[in-house]
Amino acid sequence: MKDSFNDKIKQSYDNIADTWFEKRDWYIEQASIDEAILHLHQGATILDVGCGSGKPIGEYFIKKGFDVFGVDISPKLITYAERIIPKEKLFVADVCDLMPLFAGSHCFMFMQQNILRCCRNSIHF
């Protein structure tokens, strides 16, 4: 069941990737991001979970001097993200499958609420 749902999500984001890259802009997240990064040291590593095309959020983190990695389920969105985040720091994957790899890591993980909701059974704090 999970694989079928994830395939639908991946296909949906692949379908809108061109528009997403062209039109994605800040919504309400910038204020909370600014507040969160106040607690990080310059050059800290950030994993942008569900990075999409890398903009505006990944791009913003890079401009602020952070070391940014990105992961997204959509290969097409990752192709766009390569214009912003170095290719070797990008991963096409279901973040729920990656969470165990980051247990105990010292990176700041940024993810939006909808991604956290999808992974609620995979994440243990």
Image (cartoon, rainbow, N blue to C red):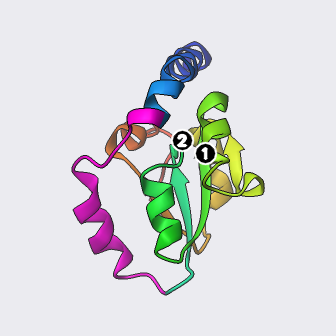
Residue at the spot x=67%, y=47% of the render? 82
Q: Is residue 116 left or right of residue 47?
A: left
Give the magenta part as a residue range: 22-41
Instruction: Please give the residue where the numbered disc 2 appears in the rendered image.
Output: 53
Q: Is residue 7 visible?
A: yes
Residues packed near mark 1 inside 10 Å, few (<14), some (14 to 19) or many (20 plus): many
Give the distance between the C-alpha atoms of the residues marked 1 and 2, in whole angstroms: 4 Å
> Are the residues tagged 1 and 2 within 8 Å (C-beta)?
yes
Circle 2: residue type: Ser
Residue 23, image x, y percentages = 38, 35
Placement of 90 over or under 35, stated as above or below = above
Residue annotated with mark 1: 81
Kindly state the secondary structure of the residue where label 1 is placed: helix
First reached walking from the N terminus: tag 1 or tag 2? 2
Q: Classify the position of the C terminus by image quarter.
A: bottom left
Q: Is residue 99 magenta?
A: no
Identify the residue at image location x=57%, y=16%: 11
Vertical placement of residue 39 versus 76, above or below: below
Residue 102 falls in which quadrant of the image?
bottom right
Q: Is residue 92 left or right of residue 5?
A: right
Front in this rendered view, residue 17 or 68: 17
**Coordinates of residue 79 in the picture (x, y in percent):** 67, 37
Q: Residue at x 69, y 50 (%)?
A: 90
